[in-house]
Image (tube, rainbow, N blue to C red):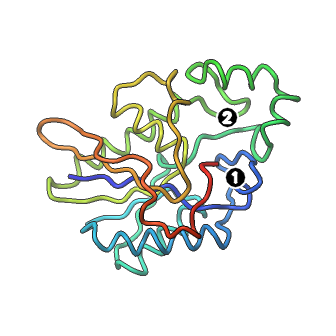
Amino acid sequence: MKFFLIRHGETEWNKLGRFQGQYDTMLNQQGLAQAKATAQAARDWELTALYSSPLSRTMRVAAEFNRQLGLPINARDGLKELALGELEGIGGEEMRANWPAVFDGWRDHPETLVMPGGESLAELQERAWQVVLDLEQTHGANDNLALISHNFAIRVICVKLLEMPLSSFHRMSLSLGSVSVFDSGPRGRRLLSYNSTGHLPPDALSPAG
């Protein structure tokens, strides 16, 4: 069984450097181009099922997969992004100025921080990993699954997969429109690729944001 973890494409908040957790932003034109290029590349992945976070920016990518591949879309709340609470929509400098303790905690000890009015990385990891466990039980060995999700959600899945501590979370970066792949079988799980953007044309590349 293979899992293809797909980060959604660019939104205006990504472009502006604003934090977006579960606020329901939409893909911009660059993000739509990334979605189309990723769905086109997915024609070679022999996918058998399609899962997505229910937020609009991920569902728009899923809709493009559905259009090109004909797979039905299955929404999973566990694939949503980290709930940022009071930090939704702010930028890094605003966080530093108005939430200095949160800024320092996020930078130095992300594994212990609970976003004000939101979630911790541990809570995000628990629900996102549960999706993986559930799908391993409901699909067969020859299935290839697309999971369309978000920056932090995909990173905590990969941290769990590699048995890394959440304190190492910031050592990983994930680009918009990227694809990461792992397999799962009798001998366990293996990360096959991480943060691949080779399927995107040069004019559809975005910063990690």
Lateral position of residue 95 relative to residue 66, left or right: right
Q: Position of residue 124 (x, y in %)?
A: 52, 36
Q: Could you say which is closer to the camera, residue 83 or residue 110? A: 110
Residue appearing at x 32%, y 74% in the figure: 43
Q: In this view, does 26 lie above or below 187?
A: below
Q: Could you say which is closer to the camera, residue 69 or residue 201? A: 201
Residue bearing mark 2: 118
Q: Position of residue 132 (x, y in %)?
A: 33, 44
| Label 2 secondary element | loop
Q: Where is residue 161 in the image (x, y as percent from the top left)?
A: 33, 34
Residue appearing at x 65%, y 46% in the figure: 21
Residue appearing at x 64%, y 19% in the figure: 108
User: In the displayed image of the protein, which residue is found farthest to the front?
Assistant: 202
Sort mark 2 into few (<14), some (14-19) or many (20+) by Cα contacts within 10 Å: some
Residue bearing mark 1: 23
Q: What residue type is labelled 1?
A: Tyr
The quarter of the picture where residue 66 lies is: bottom left
